[in-house]
Structures are given as structure tokens and as C-alpha cells.
Image (cartoon, helix red, strand yellow):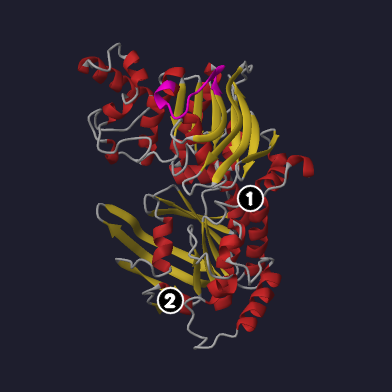
Amino acid sequence: MEDFPVLEMKHISKSFPGVVANDDISLQLKKGEVHALLGENGAGKTTLMNILFGIYHADRGEVFINNSKVSIASPSHALKHGIGMVQQHFTLVPSFTVAENVILGLKDFGFVIKTKTVESKINELSEAYGLPVNPRARVWTLSVGERQRIEILKLLYTGASIIILDEPTAVLTPQESDTLFKAIRKLVSEGSSVIFISHKLDEVLSISDRITVLRGGKVVGTVERENIDRRGLIRMMVGRDVLLDQEKPVVETGRVILKIENLNVKNDKDLMSVRNLSLEVRSGEILGIAGVAGNGQRELAEAIYGLRKKVSGRIELDGHELKQGNVAERIRAGLSFIPQDRKTVATCPNLSVMSNLFMKNSICELVHCSPWKLDGRRMHSKADELIDEFSISTPSAKTEVRYLSGGNLQKVVLARELSAEPKVIIAEHPTRGLDIGAMEFVYKSLLLQKKRGAAILLLAGELYEIFRLSDRVAVIYEGQIMGYTPPDPSYIEEIGFMMAGTRQEDH
């Protein structure tokens, strides 16, 4: 790895109405290194990279490439300077082939495109960097991992030597992540430089050479990978020690509380998304559902809670079958739901914290009043009690929840869903979009419910979260359970195969 910087960002500042996203940030990228950019949600990572790629324009600051000051007015200007970016949400045309997507927008081909020449070069790049993909395949037929390979091949085709990867493993199986990391190491060994944005600390420590941590739009520090560990990175990100590795309480599991038999559910496109799915969750147990996003997790959760009609199958709660689409019955029976969309599904943004806390009839029992005749004094008292118990940071119980941060909004949801001591909890991506401090609180809350004896179905996108919380792991692929494993990282390869569609008995 060379010592001279191929890229320097000096004193970059960027503000949006009411928010300072980047505050006097300086960053250096060396030739042939992987430089990780780490920080909590809202720390300013993606904004900084969007400035570098020409999507945003900085209010103040300068950018230098190979010691020459440059002005990057758009992504096309960035590409001319050798800067490419693979964003979290891919920018591919599903109906086009791989080759058509790779050359889309490039101006070097004139009116006649030599398709075979393009396909040949894509094959060469695919082989050279271990990113196998068929250049003639239509994008809509490819997996998420293959689509990400196309985005990287697009940059390599243009000759980009500074590559920005924004949360590149968020939707990949473990095997696909390994393939990506091999390609990254090949790139830097040949002199390219990579800026790697991720919230997965283990990945950052595995792939990076140096790490810059942002907090509140400012640089906390830059460290060499070998001089820092996981705990040190968390301390830099949050400003204090955080216990994400919560010790699971030893609980003797009891009877089956949630039982699903041969469930079939359609998605919003009227296609079967959950197929003949069966599972059981016992009291005092957390069953983690692992799988790449879009394999029926959302439809499964909504069908159990009654928000989505099932095509066929049986859902039982504590031995009693739940009727089709009857949410009120489920609430009375002791079922709680923590949806992944806390802003539009789990809460009403224009209502107060107190109103959101008392949205379900079961809460009225806590304040000993009828839903038809609410006792304002008791409700205020109970609301203040829940705000204190769940550490909700809000000016008052009357504050509209749209003014709360993501972490505090999730605490409102937790307070409402958990305070009634439910028998079954469906937790759908309960920490998505939360900072580390809020994640710690969610973990503690779910483990306390487990200790109390609740049966918890955890649908999470991160394997490390499933391993830390679950007692068993079920892997879902295209709406089917492919098999079960213990919550142990030594099973990650087996889980990866199942996430890609290989049944457990076929390994």
C-alpha cells in the first residue's frame, strides 16, 4: 500500500434545513487501501460520499485527486475523475441485459454498439475479479448478489480506480459477502482504492486497512485497523461503552404458544410469497428467522398478526386458531407486533406519544378505564411511567411522535407492545435503522420478555443479531423454511447455503 493520498476531502461542510449533516470533515484515501467509514445512522457517512460522487454539492470545502483540486458537479464528472459509487439501492434497468446495463449512459460507443465486444470485456472483468455473471442475462432474472456484481462491473468497465461501496453486504448471503471481499482485495492489490461504508463492525475489522469514525457529522478520529477492536470502535461511535453482546437468560422453554401449519400467503403482486410454511415457537423461546430480504418475511409477519389474508393454512395462538384478518382478536389473545416500518405502520406520526402508547385496548386495562370513557389523569400518569421505564427522550407525553428520533420512536412502539406482557411477540427487523445505543435497549427489552416466558418470533436481516438473541435459527427462502440450526456462527456456511435455496438435507 502506497503512502500518498489519491484522494483528499478537506473541511467539507453540508447543511440541510435544520440539520448539519457534515461539519468540517477532512478525509484522506491512500492508493491501494480499503478505508472504512463508520458511524451511527445520521452521522453523515452517505452525505459525505454523495458529495464526493457529485450527487450533493458541499456548502464549503475542497476535493483533491492526486494532489490536484477538482470540482465534481455530477456523477458523470466523478466518473471522469475515476470515482465510482455503488449505492445501497441499485440503479439497474430490470428488463435490460447485464451488458446493456453496464454501458448504459456511457458516451464512448456512438450509434453502433458492438455487443460481442462489450460482452467479451465483461467476461474478462468477471473472471479477473471473481465476479461471475452472464452478460446476456436479463437483470430481473438475477439474484441480489449478482445484481451487485453488475454495479461493480459497471465501475470497472469505466476504469474507476476510487470505488465507494455504501452498505454493500446489507442484502447478501454470507457466501456472496465472501465473494465481494475477495473482489475488493483483488482490486486494492492492483492499485485501486476503496471506501467501504458499513455498520457491521466485524466486517469493517475484517476488510479495512484504516477506519474513520463519524459522530454527529464530525470526524471523531481515524485509526489503523490493527490498533482498534470492536469495543474501541463502538466507544468512538457512541461515546461510551455499549453491551451489544447481551447474555441470554437461561429459561426453560415451555409449551408451544405459536403454531403455524402449511401457511400460504400472497404478496402485493398477487404472487405466492409464503409457501406451505410450518413452524412452532415455545414460551421462553426466541426463534430467529434468517433470510435475504424479500423472501416472504414481511408477508409471514403480517399474516400472523392479521394484517394480510392467508390463502390457506392454520395459525394457532396458545392452542386456539386465529380467525382470518381479525387483528383485535389477536391483541386480546396476547399477540404483539413490532413492525419494521415504525413511522407509518407502527405509529401515527401526527398523534402524541401518549396517544400512540394507548392505541390498543389492552393498554386501557393498565390504567383501569374503559375505551369508551378514558381517564385523562390516569393516562397521563401511566404515560409518564412508561416514558420513564422505556427511557423515551421526549419533551412531554403530549409531543407528536413525528418529532422523535428513530430510536425514541421505536421505544414508544416497544412500550406499547411489551407493557401488556404479551404471550407472543413478532419482532420484524426491530433494530433496523437504529443507532448502537438504541439497539442495545431493544436487545435488553426482548431478552427480558423471553425471561418472562413470552414466545418471540424474530425476523431480522442481520445474522449477528439473530445469533445474539435466538435460541434456534430457521432459514427462509422463497417463503419456505429450508432448515434449522443452532444460533452459532460456526453454522454460517450452512445458513448461507439455505439462504441461497439449498435445503438442509441436500448439503
Q: Vertical placement of 62 versus 198: above or below?
A: below
Position of residue 40 relative to residue 421, above or below, is below
At horizontal 69% and vertical 66% (from top left) the residue drawn is 130
The magenta segment is 316-329
Image disc number at residue 76: 2
- Vertical position of residue 449 compared to residue 162: above or below: above
Find disc 1 in the rendering and name its residue. 173
CA–CA distance in space, label 2 to label 1:
31 Å
Image quadrant in which you'd find residue 57: bottom left
* Left or right: residue 114 compared with residue 63: right
Picture residue at 24% right of the left edge, 20% below the top? 380
Quadrant occupied by the N terminus: bottom right
Q: Amino acid at mark 2?
A: Ser
* Amino acid, disc 1: Thr
On screen, 421 above or below 430? above
Spot occupied by residue 193 in the image (x, y as percentages of width and height): 57, 68
Residue 476 in the figure: left or right of residue 359? right
Q: Is residue 299 visible?
A: yes
379 vs 65, left or right, is left
